[in-house]
Image (tube, grey):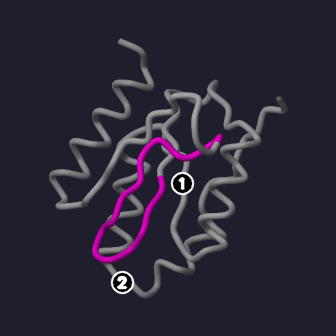
């Protein structure tokens, strides 16, 4: 099993355990390029998650565009390399759902690969 697949399964398990709604976005060659792997709703907040298996996997320019557009629209958008990345965001939401909007500037910078 690919590392990214296992990471995604761990994240989905954690989301379900926390009561989040989610859907997987499977790219089939149709639709928008770069849509994050998981779209979630947690405590009324929209969260998009691009899953990467390890630090060697990079985020494409299309993925960066979609993550930035989601942030601009008021959603949360992250690149997660483990469940702990997502858990940290959910814990921050649990601590103070209104303060989460201040997280955007401190979320990890995106590592981009040119196409």
Residue 46 among those drawn in magenta: yes
Residue 25: which quarter of the image?
top left
Residue 21: which quarter of the image?
bottom left
**Of the numbered discs in the image, which one, if any, rests on residue 23?**
none
Q: Residue at x 36, y 34 (%)?
A: 8
**Residue 36 placement (x, y as % from top left):** 53, 46
**Residue 22 placement (x, y as % from top left):** 30, 53
Task: Please state the extent of the stretch shown in magenta in the rendering.
Answer: 33-48
- In the image, residue 69 above or below residue 52: below
Q: Which residue is mark 2?
A: 96
Which is more toward the observer, 97 or 35?
A: 35
Q: Which residue is mark 1?
A: 78
- In the rendered view, does 88 fall on the left or right side of 63? left
In front: label 2 or label 1: 1
Please, what secondary structure does the residue beneath circle 2 have? loop
Q: Quadrant of the N terminus?
A: top left
- In the rendered view, does 62 fall on the left or right side of 87? right
Please, what secondary structure does the residue beneath circle 1 have? strand
Q: Give the mark nearer the N terminus: 2 vs 1.
A: 1
Q: Residue at x 65, y 54 (%)?
A: 66
- In the image, residue 50 above or below residue 28: below
């Amino acid at each position: 099993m690919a590392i990214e697949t296992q990471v995604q399964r761990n994240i989905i398990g954690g989301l379900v355990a926390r009561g989040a709604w989610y859907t997987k976005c499977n790219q089939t060659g149709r639709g928008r390029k770069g849509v994050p792997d998981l779209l979630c709703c947690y405590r009324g907040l929209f969260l998009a998650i691009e899953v990467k298996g390890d630090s060697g996997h990079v985020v494409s320019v299309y993925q960066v565009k979609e993550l930035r557009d989601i942030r601009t629209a008021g959603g949360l958008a992250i690149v997660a390399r483990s469940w702990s990345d997502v858990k940290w965001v959910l814990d921050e939401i649990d601590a103070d759902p209104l303060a989460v909007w201040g997280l955007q500037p401190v979320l990890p910078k995106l590592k981009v690969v040119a196409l």
